[in-house]
Amino acid sequence: MQGTDAHLGWGEHARRRIASCALFELYAVERTSARGKTGEFWVLDAPDWVNVVPVTTTADGEPALIMVRQFRHGAELITTEFPAGLVEPGEDPAAAAARELEEETGCRAGRLTPLNTVLPNPAFMNNRSYTFLAEDLTRIGGTKLDELEALEPRIVPVAEIERNLGTGEYVNALTVLGFLWYRSRGAAPR
């Protein structure tokens, strides 16, 4: 760390793997602050993620987004969120977004635009989450889910998402953020 922020930096002295799981590696990392304080910190080395905001309309022509309902094991509840998934090693995030959209909704985007990128929880995770806007959708078939994946795609009117965002099934933080980015681009219900 350089310049005026050097006093906030921490130097790493040691790193040992504690556990290796299918989705991440857990490390204990020893670091010393610029002020000389040393401590051990836990870091999850996790793959990058993608979220896709697929734009469509309802049968009545209302602005809508394609979302998926699925059980989330961490929260032990069913959520409604945007199609999403992991970026495979060496895979471009845009390619991962296109793949996840097709697998989870059976749709292909004619136009895929990056909305933004965030660090989901930089306190202890080192990955990035990329959010893409998917437009000009074409239905190319059914879903192609992984063996342990169970989800239900549905077309949700934008007005319904706005009413429910942050409540009930609409509580996934990256979905909330993706929707806010979608809205910040000037997308509004008719």
Image (cartoon, helix red, strand yellow):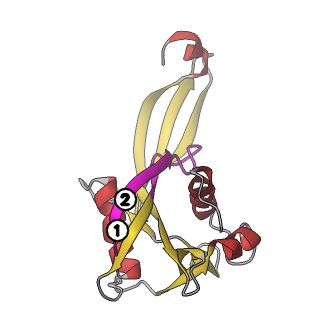
Residue 112's tag is 2
Which SS class for mark 1? Answer: strand
Task: Say few, some or many: other residues with alpha carbon within 10 Å of mark 1 (under 14 / 14 to 19 / 20 or more).
Answer: some
Where is residue 180 drawn, in percent x and y?
63, 55
Q: Say left or right for 10 vs 87.
A: right
Residue 80's tag is none
Q: Say left or right for 87 vs 151.
A: left
Amino acid on which disc 2 is placed: Leu
Residue 109's tag is 1
The alpha-carbon separation of the residues under discs 2 and 1 comes to: 6 Å
Q: Find the magenta span and give its range.
A: 107-132
Answer whether labels 2 and 1 touch (C-beta < 8 Å): yes
Where is residue 50 drawn, in percent x and y?
42, 60
Say which of 46 and 130 sits in front: 130
Say which of 50 and 47 sits in front: 50
Residue 109 occupies quadrant: bottom left
- Residue 78 in sight: yes
